[in-house]
Image (tube, rainbow, N blue to C red):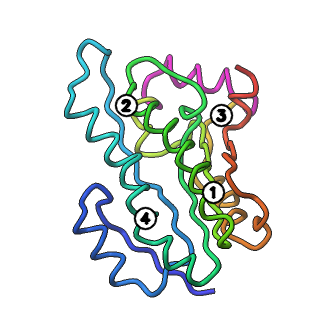
Amino acid sequence: HDATALPFDASVGPARRAAIETADPVDILVNNAGIIHRAPLADFPEDKWRDVLDVNLTAPFLLAQLLAPGMVERGWGRIINISSIMGQIGRATIPAYVSSKHGLIGLTKTLAVELGPHGVTVNAINPGYFATEFNAPLIADPDFNSMVKTRTPLGRWGDPAELAGAAVFLASDAGGYVNGAALTVDGGMTASL
């Protein structure tokens, strides 16, 4: 199969629309954009709260709203939302991120119910701790790095390539009967908490 990636700023409405308009019909949408802001509750700025929710939750909603009608019309489509284990649990100093990821799982389930009868599946992937640029500050923190390795039964951070299989499965016909699920890929961390 041929595939085309469309990089754009998911928080900017015109950028979303321009990217969609340049695409052939989109059969698979992977909502992978995500940002985080770290601060204690008392010091968490309202604008940062809104920024995180705009990128992590509102943009996936708006992209699904733009693309789902075409998928419904064609009778086939896949929407895969990249949530987080923070959509299942909580952690101090990242209230907007945790709230957005919980919300994204709720959005996944709601859209699965609405779009499923039209041949469109909607699922989420909940990554645990992966060795990415996004997590570089956490990897560099010896205490946090040790906590991840100690609490993860596989004893390590995930390799980003290890998420690909979950996405391919959910996008393929093999995952055609999976709808409204939140597949956790975390080396067993949430199972052991």
Q: Which of marks 2 and 4 is nearer the N terminus?
A: 4
Q: Which amino acid does label 2 sit on?
A: Ala
The answer to whether 102 is drawn above or below residue 72 in the figure is above
Closer to the camera: disc 4 or disc 3? 4
Q: Name the residue under label 3.
A: 156
**Three-letter amino acid code of the residue under disc 4:** Gln
Q: What residue type is disc 3 on?
A: Arg
Nearest the viewer among 74 and 44 is 74
In the rendered image, the vertical position of residue 76 relative to residue 138, given as above or below: below
Span colored in magenta = 139-154
Q: How far apart are marks 2 and 4 (CA)?
A: 23 Å
Mark 4–mark 3 distance (CA, rounded to whole Å): 37 Å
Q: Which of 63 and 153 is in front in this view?
A: 63
Q: Main secondary structure of the magenta part?
A: helix
Decide: few, some or many residues near mark 3? Use Cα within 10 Å; few <14, some 14-19, many ≥20: some
Tell me the CA gap for discs 3 and 1.
33 Å
Residue of label 4: 65
Q: Name the residue under label 2.
A: 96
Residue bearing mark 1? 112
Q: Residue placed at 55% from the left, 42% from the top? A: 106
Q: Where is residue 138 in the image (x, y as percent from the top left)?
A: 44, 29
